[in-house]
Amino acid sequence: MKKLFYFTLAFFTLVSCGKEKEVEANKFEFDGIDESIKPGDNFFLHVNKTWYDNAVIADDQAGVGSYSFLNIPQKKLLENILEEVSSGTHEKGSADQMVGDFYSSGMNTALINERGFEPIQSLLDQINAINSIPAMMEFVANEYKSGNGSLISMGVSPDNENSSVNMLHFGQTGLGLPDRDYYFKTDESTLEIQKAYQAYLTKLFELIGNENAEQSTSTAYGIEKQLAEAHKTRIERRNVKANYNKIAVADLKINQPNIGWSKLLDHFGAEADSVDIAQPAYYAKLNTMLPSVSLADWKTYLKAKVLTNYADILSEPFETAAFEYSKIISGQAVKQSRAQIMVNKVDRQLGFALGQLYVERYFNEEAKSRVLDLVNNLQKAFENRINELDWMSDATKVQAKEKLYTITKKIGYPDVWRDYGNVNIDKDKFFENVVALRQNDYQYGLDKLNKAPNKDEWGTTPSTVTAYYNPPLNEIVFPAGILQFPYFDLQADDAINYGGIGMVIGHELTHAFDDQGAQFDKDGNVKNWWTDEDYEKFQAKTQLIIDRYSSYTVLDSLHLKGALSVGENTADNGGISIAYDAFKLTKQGQDTVKIGGYTPDQRFFMSIARIWRVKTRDEYLRNYVKTNSHSPPMWRVNGPLMNFTPFYEAFDVQPGDANYKPVEERIKIW
Ligand SMILES: [Zn+2]
């Protein structure tokens, strides 16, 4: 407490302002508030319009903001680490050596370019030699180990019905466009993306000397489109129960003989009596297509898959072809610097080794304990809200609270760092390094099969600016990357921190009780813990969220997909409410002293508006709305605030204001 006071004095200047004491602060000020936009008309723009007017999206970016990969300063820090460790000599197998040498190998573009597509020549030869469906499936399985999910997608994670044991899950795959819908929609923007994708395939075929490149593209694309017909939509995949189908391998052998399940599992090195076929229609279709499509056409398709899987780690012409396609979707004008491209690749392949180096340099341990305090306060506030719910019976409330207090909290970085084993990272072998690391990932996943889930494991790297809730393990995770401004700062007042990381914590806690989370019990099993009546009421409330968000228009006629984003929107609504209640338990939350001209409550809501501001290109936004389960920034803020009465009071929102909703239309679930 003393320490905190010291910091407060060091960073704030106390000034007198009439009878009210005002505290001036620097980065904790809210600059650029647009007073011409009433908070009740559009609070998000009231706070952020000036920022949007001034924020410039760099040519090599799809957007700019604090969140996720758009946080450029964060990625610059990682680049600094990589530059530093790659210039030294380190013990073989150490985090510094692996990270440094992997980075160096990727920076050596002269060598990468010199090799052309020689690194994949042996794979192309193997495809040429395939003479039967079983031989083809063996190739598919082997390639999967190197990250090439051509026709089969497999993962190891807890059994939905017995979360204490990991099992094999097989999912739909096989496409090159971002989503199955992209094969069937006929609007202008989708047609442009289809065209760019086909041009990309043609370019890749040409680069390996295929004289009938366009014909090959048409063959590969035609197969993808057939597979896409059997794909479930993203909305259909939100239904947890419908996407879990435990089947005995013995039955699969009989029902889908062309896939050759026994041999396939052998090739994967996986032992299982039963597996989850998450999307059965896909595998049924694949089984039918295997003999009906000619082997020659399958081989063309597999070449397309090899090319697209490795294009970005081959020589410049391949890498450029991949970028030319991706930019149609992202809107990004030019490639990122090679160093920034490598930041992403190191984070993806060696993220926990890099994370270790990041945490050593940039993470303040005090943040961990302070954020844990916040999590505990939010948990308490959530419990109070559950107690006061007028629509839920006591029986279900008991279950809900039990689940709430069973949630595991992971903050900062893993207690146990992932060991990358004896992967050999060589300064001069970029392609081989990537393949070795992908194979290591595969083996790492497979080693978990038939065992209890590893509770020390993290699903995101420590430097990533994100957070998540994981239903099968009933855990919330906040990596070091998000424990910094504007989400959190040890020197910030509680209004900023509760409106920042507090809102994020509340959001993740609510995921345990959104449309999907509600189907998992406290132990991570898909098991009903609700009374029938309560669950019906919950679903009716969830439908209100779906309908409300579906009514929002993002670009021209593009509507939000309420049914796709319902979980995230539920979490945004719950998150703000819980964070606010927890904030009201703090000293500042109960006070009225203004800082920078704003009341504690006003600062809390302004902090929420600030953390989500992200400016993206229209192309990126269009794809985001179609494929991402989160609402775009403005609706992450205005959407929940329209439903939250304390916001109306803090900013005197009145009937007639554009975003005003009468009390009975303010949706509240949690
Ligand atoms: Zn979320």
Image (cartoon, grey):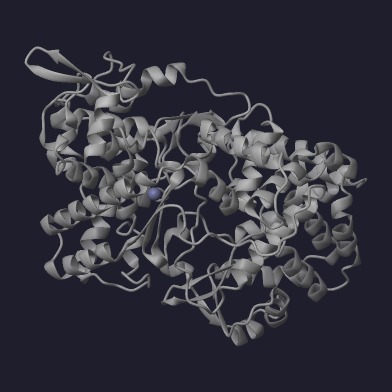
Locate residue 7 relative to residue 654 in the image: left or right: right
**Residue 39 point in image, percent of width and height:** 24, 24
**Residue 277 point in image, percent of width and height:** 55, 72
Question: In this view of the protein, which residue sits in the foreground, 373 or 51?
Answer: 373
- In the figure, residue 521 lies in which quadrant? bottom left
- In the figure, residue 586 lies in which quadrant? top left
- Above or below — where is 343 with respect to 36? below
Q: Is residue 571 visible?
A: no
Question: In this view of the protein, which residue sits in the foreground, 83 or 541?
Answer: 83
- Above or below — where is 320 with respect to 270? above
Question: In this view of the protein, which residue sits in the foreground, 670 or 557?
Answer: 670
Locate residue 218 relative to residue 71 in the image: left or right: right
Q: Considering the image in quadrants, where does the N terminus appear? A: top left
User: Of all residues shown, which one is farthest toward the bottom?
Assistant: 250
Q: Who's the residue at 42% across and 69% down the image? A: 241
Locate residue 407 relative to residue 63 in the image: left or right: left
Locate residue 173 relative to residue 633 in the image: left or right: right
Q: Who's the residue at 14% across and 42% down the image? A: 664
Badge count: 0
**Residue 593 point in image, percent of width and height:** 13, 26
Question: In this view of the protein, which residue sits in the foreground, 250 or 472?
Answer: 472
Q: Who's the residue at 16% across and 35% down the image? A: 588
- Above or below — where is 419 with respect to 200? below
**Residue 45 point in image, percent of width and height:** 33, 23
Q: Is residue 430 visible?
A: yes
User: Of all residues shown, which one is farthest toward the left?
Assistant: 19
